[in-house]
């Protein structure tokens, strides 16, 4: 494949069959392969129409007139990584809310946190590290932070670290801002609304903003799951919910192996409600609905 031309040259390309909105077979397959190589996301044929419809705006924004030119851009442009994240945004949905899959947070409070408390008090290592992988717009990680603060607030000698990662820089900015529609209050227990949120007006709309007590618990980082763990230190808990559903089989295996290596020997993994380890990984023991505990290496 030839090196990337300058943006003017690329915009002049308009091969028959490669006009905006017309993703011909070979051009689509080349883009499909690149995205899976770089992100692990498998773009199935049945999602092609939706993806290409969304992607037309990216071609127009960049002044590109063919899907081949866009694929070249993703390979060689200085902003290739940023644009790859925007392509991923076209592929995925960011539908999430506070306390989604409530049983996960009940299990955290009733089983996982007491387990680590007992172990830490016994061995003197009073630290807890959580990784929310594919954190999207932040509702999940702030729910984790609420649960963590509520339980561990009574143990001030413990050091708590929560890392939230996503491939999309733009989505991370939304998460960092922590401003949500006022309607989210229906998903959050009333005592937590008072403790962890402030009512504000944003763009003329009533909103809720997370308080600094939660913001200060979380480190947001731009990260591609295909690059392994974002930290050299082990995590006690990993949340990766409704992310693997977009991945190809081999990428799922690679990411699950990353999670296994990244977790301490008795660490816990939480997946989304439609995700499963069946046929992918036998290194975790099922503890409940989409809740797993690491099986240490022999």
Image (spheres, grey):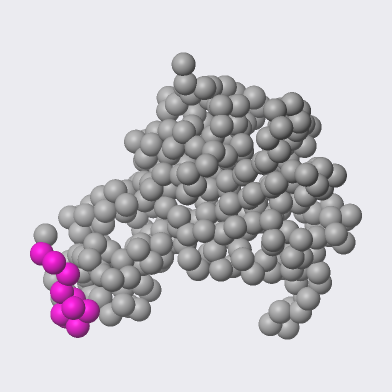
Rendered position, 153 above or below 65: above
Pick out the residue farthest to the left.
2
The magenta-colored residue range is 2-12
Residue under the point 61% across and 66% down = 176
Rendered position, 17 above or below 217: below
In the image, is 9 to the left or to the right of 37?
left
Residue under the point 48% across and 66% down = 169
Q: Nearer the viewer, residue 94 or 54?
A: 94
Q: Residue 154 at what x, y percent from top left? A: 85, 44
Task: Residue 10: say if magenta.
Answer: yes
Residue under the point 36% across and 67% down = 83
Q: Nearer the viewer, residue 236 or 193?
A: 236
Which quadrant would the N terminus be assigned to in this image?
bottom left
**Snapshot quadrant of residue 11:** bottom left
Q: Residue 142 at what x, y percent from top left? A: 69, 55
Q: Nearer the viewer, residue 164 or 65?
A: 164
In the image, is 147 to the left or to the right of 84?
right
**Snapshot quadrant of residue 108:** top right
Query: Residue 45, can we see it?
Result: no
Q: Nearer the viewer, residue 178 or 26?
A: 178
**Snapshot quadrant of residue 86:** bottom left
Task: Residue 104: say if magenta.
Answer: no
Rendered position, 128 above or below 61: above
Q: Residue 284 at what x, y percent from top left? A: 53, 25
Residue under the point 52% across and 22% down = 296
């Amino acid at each position: 494949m030839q090196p990337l031309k300058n943006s003017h040259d690329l915009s002049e390309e308009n091969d028959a069959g490669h006009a905006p909105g017309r993703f011909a077979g070979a051009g689509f397959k080349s883009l499909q392969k690149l995205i899976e190589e770089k992100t692990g996301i498998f773009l199935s044929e049945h999602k092609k129409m939706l993806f290409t419809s969304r992607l037309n705006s990216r071609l127009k924004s960049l002044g590109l007139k063919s899907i081949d030119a866009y694929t070249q851009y993703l390979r060689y442009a200085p902003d290739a990584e940023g644009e790859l994240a925007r392509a991923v945004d076209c592929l995925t949905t960011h539908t999430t809310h506070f306390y989604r899959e409530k049983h996960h947070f009940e299990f955290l409070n009733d089983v996982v946190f007491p387990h680590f408390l007992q172990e830490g008090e016994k061995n003197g290592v009073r630290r807890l590290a959580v990784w929310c992988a594919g954190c999207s717009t932040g509702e999940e990680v702030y729910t984790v932070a609420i649960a963590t603060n509520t339980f561990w607030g009574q143990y001030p000698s413990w050091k708590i670290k929560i890392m939230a990662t996503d491939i999309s820089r733009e989505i991370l900015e939304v998460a960092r801002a922590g401003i949500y529609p006022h309607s989210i209050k229906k998903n959050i227990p009333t005592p937590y609304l008072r403790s962890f949120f402030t009512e504000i007006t944003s763009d003329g709309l009533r909103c809720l903003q997370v308080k600094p007590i939660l913001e200060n618990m979380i480190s947001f980082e731009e990260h591609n799951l295909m690059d392994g763990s974002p930290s050299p230190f082990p995590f006690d808990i990993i949340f990766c919910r409704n992310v693997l559903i977009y991945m190809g089989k081999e990428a799922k295996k690679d990411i699950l192996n990353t999670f296994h290596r990244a977790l301490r020997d008795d660490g816990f993994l939480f997946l989304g409600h439609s995700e499963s380890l069946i046929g992918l990984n036998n290194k975790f023991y099922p503890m409940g609905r989409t809740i797993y505990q690491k099986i240490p290496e022999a």
